[in-house]
């Protein structure tokens, strides 16, 4: 258990000397619901089965659908033979490009399904079998025969691929290339140089609930229960694809069983269900089997990264180059922004950060928890460890020597940066020993023991949102915002934010989310949900409180309602560079007989603004650290060059860590006061936990064995 006895985490003081009581957030009263350890309000509904997910809605007359993915890696469909599928009892329709409803162009091209005969990658949706039962749909899909004209495919990412190019922008709108000073000259003149090439394999999100949609048309209106991270955006995409007004589409995502980015954009699942419902005139349910996920819901693209550092004899960096090579599909450009964190982390007067990408015949990559930062910081923080070894410095001390008060890339001051405090606090709690850094000397029988550290960072995003707050005459309130609670506790924290602004208790606040008919709101993505939705909730509730005071408590029977939006606040440029920081520590054992790496302890300390709910925050941190453990040791998708797609398609072959994989995990935080963020003083916490974890484990493996592997995951075959 990583919490202090009072459940509030650590209270280390910041470099600004203000600690927790300096900023606007710190001035709150002890009884303030914001910051209080509050249990999830939907916990009971979830564990008793009362919470219903997208595939658990079965409108009267509902049909079941099964999607069919392309059986080749590239080419064209030449014929769809429906007879055998249609002769399966219960099968009512087979949709393919020759009979499916037409979609309007313009939206995300990965949603342009069943519109033409092109096959851009294996698993691309080419047909949908609709039936009276899930069994009949599955049997029908197996009986469907499709003829293809196959073309040669190219699915292998290599550092010398002739079609690599430098994109204008990487994911998130970051420039593809940034250059400062004269890297070449500064690197050549450096006393110490490090040059490492790091490889991160393809990874898949695999949320507990696979993607699913139940869709129907009613009086010209499209209604969909869909598992996604933001139903306002899905509603907008469906309206654009089907040529409808936004108020002619309703998308409901009241409960979502995880997404990790794979549900951050609209997926073909909901489009296919809506097409089939239109085609058949009945409700249609499409629940993707897990083995279909890799082809249609995105993956973290593999990266080949080269980091070159040039430093003085004390390890102070003069020259930094980070090149990230990655893949996208021929359907859409998506560039994992792995070189971006090197623009944020350390003093580096001479720097080049560059992305290169090639469009292969692979499924389209997409967001996966901490896109960019997770693989990018694996490379950078491994290289920092190599630099520490090269100059003979403790890795914590080396990072402190390269700490910076301004973001190197933009020159802007940080709104707050407590990286040094995270490193020091983590070292203290972990029991870090700077005098024990010699590799490969600690043994317990066949086991070699090592410890490692890495830094973490994640940007602060803030997106425009709308919200309404309503007071009822009985003293209760209803707050509405189309946020998505994907398992994070958003419902609970938003009710705390509302109650704080309304000066009431959270149990007097009803919180409505997860329905696109509620006030428009952005996705649960980029660790921005609480800041974005919460700011709108805070604004509506603050204005309502002021109105109620003017009114002296006398309300009409229908109550009083206030709406607010944060378009101005969220789009105003900030003079500050805003990022969360952290430090991760790992202790590993390496079995010298089997090559197996086990992590004995993981400990993270984070500086992520004001922590609004220590219970749900701790879950976010340790959940992401666990995902980092998977990235380090067991998760990885293997591209099969002949088959033309990833081989791992289930949780048996794609091993996500479980409790048995990690005896001890602790998350702590520095309760940071930062008044340049939002009314709550919070930074995002959903993603930073994965950042740095794999590097900390890799660095611990080096400390244990003396081996610098530079390729994830650290499986026994690589160790031996
Ligand atoms: Mo997260 S990968 O931004 O949904």
Image (spheres, rainbow, N blue to C red):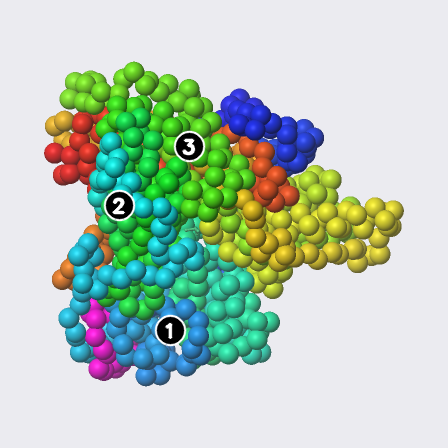
Q: Going 23% across and 78% down the picture, which residue do you hit? A: 76
Local SS, label 3: loop
In this rendered view, identify the residue nearer to me: 308 or 637. 308
Of tags 3 and 2, which is closer to the observer? Answer: 2
**N-term-proximal mark, 3 vs 2:** 2
Q: Name the residue that disc number 3 marks.
A: 403
Q: Is residue 71 magenta?
A: yes
Q: Name the residue that disc number 2 marks.
A: 184
Mark 3: few/some/many CA within 10 Å (<14, 14-19, 20+)? some
Mark 2: few/some/many CA within 10 Å (<14, 14-19, 20+)? some
Q: Quarter holding the C terminus?
A: top left
**N-term-proximal mark, 3 vs 1:** 1
Q: Left or right of 664: which side holds 152?
A: left
Q: Name the residue that disc number 1 marks.
A: 112
Q: Left or right of 695: which side holds 550?
A: right
Q: Left or right of 353: which side holds 54?
A: right
Q: Separation of disc 3 and disc 1 at Cα? A: 47 Å
Q: Going 44% across and 35% down the picture, which residue do you hit? A: 404
User: Which x, y percent locates residue 87?
Assistant: 28, 79
Local SS, label 2: helix
Of tags 2 and 1, which is closer to the observer? Answer: 2
In this rendered view, identify the residue nearer to me: 320 or 472. 320
In this rendered view, identify the residue nearer to me: 4 or 425. 425
Q: Separation of disc 3 and disc 2 at Cα? A: 22 Å
Q: How many marks?
A: 3
Tell me if I can see residue 373 in this picture. no
**N-term-proximal mark, 2 vs 1:** 1
User: Which x, y percent locates residue 519?
Assistant: 63, 60
């Amino acid at each position: 258990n990583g919490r202090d006895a009072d459940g509030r985490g650590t209270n280390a003081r910041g470099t600004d000397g203000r600690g927790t009581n300096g900023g606007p957030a710190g001035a709150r009263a002890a009884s303030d619901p914001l910051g209080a350890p509050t249990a999830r309000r939907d916990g009971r509904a979830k564990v008793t089965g009362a919470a219903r997910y997208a595939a658990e809605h079965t409108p009267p007359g509902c049909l079941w659908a099964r999607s069919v993915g392309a059986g080749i890696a590239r080419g064209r469909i030449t014929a769809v033979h429906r007879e055998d599928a249609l002769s399966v009892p219960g099968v009512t329709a087979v949709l393919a490009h020759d009979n499916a409803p037409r979609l309007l162009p313009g939206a995300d091209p990965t949603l342009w399904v069943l519109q033409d005969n092109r096959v851009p990658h294996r698993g691309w949706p080419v047909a949908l079998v609709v039936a009276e039962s899930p069994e009949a749909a599955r049997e029908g899909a197996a009986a469907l025969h499709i003829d293809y004209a196959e073309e040669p495919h190219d699915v292998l990412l290599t550092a010398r691929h002739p079609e690599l190019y430098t994109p204008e922008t990487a994911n998130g709108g970051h420039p593809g290339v940034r250059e400062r000073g004269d890297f070449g000259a500064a690197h050549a003149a450096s006393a110490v140089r490090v040059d490492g090439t790091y490889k991160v394999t393809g990874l898949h999100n695999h949320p507990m609930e696979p993607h699913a949609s139940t869709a129907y048309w009613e009086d010209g209106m499209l209604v969909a229960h869909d598992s996604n991270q933001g139903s306002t955006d899905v509603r907008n995409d469906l309206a654009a694809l089907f040529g409808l007004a936004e108020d002619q589409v309703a998308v409901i995502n009241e409960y979502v069983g995880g997404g990790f980015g794979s549900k951050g954009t609209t997926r073909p699942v909901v489009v296919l269900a809506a097409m089939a419902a239109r085609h058949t005139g009945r409700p249609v349910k499409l629940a993707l089997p897990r083995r279909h996920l890799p082809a249609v819901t995105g993956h973290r693209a593999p990266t080949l990264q080269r980091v070159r550092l040039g430093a003085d004899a004390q390890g102070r960096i003069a020259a930094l180059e980070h090149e990230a090579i990655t893949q996208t599909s021929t359907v859409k450009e998506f560039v994992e922004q792995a070189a971006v964190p090197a623009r944020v982390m350390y003093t580096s007067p001479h720097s080049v950060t560059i992305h290169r990408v090639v469009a292969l015949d692979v499924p389209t990559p997409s967001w996966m928890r901490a896109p960019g930062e997770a693989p990018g910081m694996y490379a950078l923080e491994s290289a920092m460890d190599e630099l520490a070894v090269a100059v003979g410095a403790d890795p914590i001390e080396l990072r402190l020597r390269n700490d910076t008060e301004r973001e190197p890339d933009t020159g802007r001051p940080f709104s707050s940066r407590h990286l040094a405090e995270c490193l020091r606090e983590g070292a203290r709690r972990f029991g870090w020993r700077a005098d024990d850094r010699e590799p490969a000397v600690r043994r317990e029988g066949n086991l070699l023991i090592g410890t490692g550290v890495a830094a973490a960072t994640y940007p602060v995003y803030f997106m425009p949102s709308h919200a309404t707050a309503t007071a009822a005459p009985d003293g209760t309130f209803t707050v509405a915002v189309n946020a998505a609670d994907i398992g994070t506790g958003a419902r609970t924290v938003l009710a705390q934010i509302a109650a704080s602004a309304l000066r009431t208790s959270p149990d007097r606040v009803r919180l409505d989310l997860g329905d696109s008919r509620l006030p428009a709101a952005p996705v649960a993505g980029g660790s921005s949900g609480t800041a974005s939705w919460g700011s709108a909730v805070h604004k509506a509730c603050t204005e309502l409180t002021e109105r109620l005071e003017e009114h002296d408590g006398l309300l009409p029977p229908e109550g009083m309602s206030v709406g607010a939006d944060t378009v101005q606040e969220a789009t105003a440029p900030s003079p500050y560079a805003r990022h969360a920081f952290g430090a991760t520590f790992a202790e590993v054992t390496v079995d010298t007989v089997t090559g197996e790496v086990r992590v004995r302890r993981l400990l993270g300390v984070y500086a992520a603004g004001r922590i609004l709910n220590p219970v749900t925050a701790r879950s976010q941190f340790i959940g992401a650290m666990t995902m980092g453990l998977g990235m380090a040791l067991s998760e990885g998708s293997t591209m099969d060059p002949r088959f033309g797609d990833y081989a791992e398609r289930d949780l048996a072959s794609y091993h996500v860590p479980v409790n048995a994989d990690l005896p001890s995990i602790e998350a702590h935080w520095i309760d940071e006061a930062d008044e340049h963020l939002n009314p709550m003083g919070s930074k995002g916490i959903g993603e930073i936990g994965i950042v740095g974890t794999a590097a900390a484990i890799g660095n611990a493996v080096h400390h244990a064995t003396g081996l610098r592997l530079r390729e994830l995951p650290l499986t026994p075959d690589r160790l031996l």
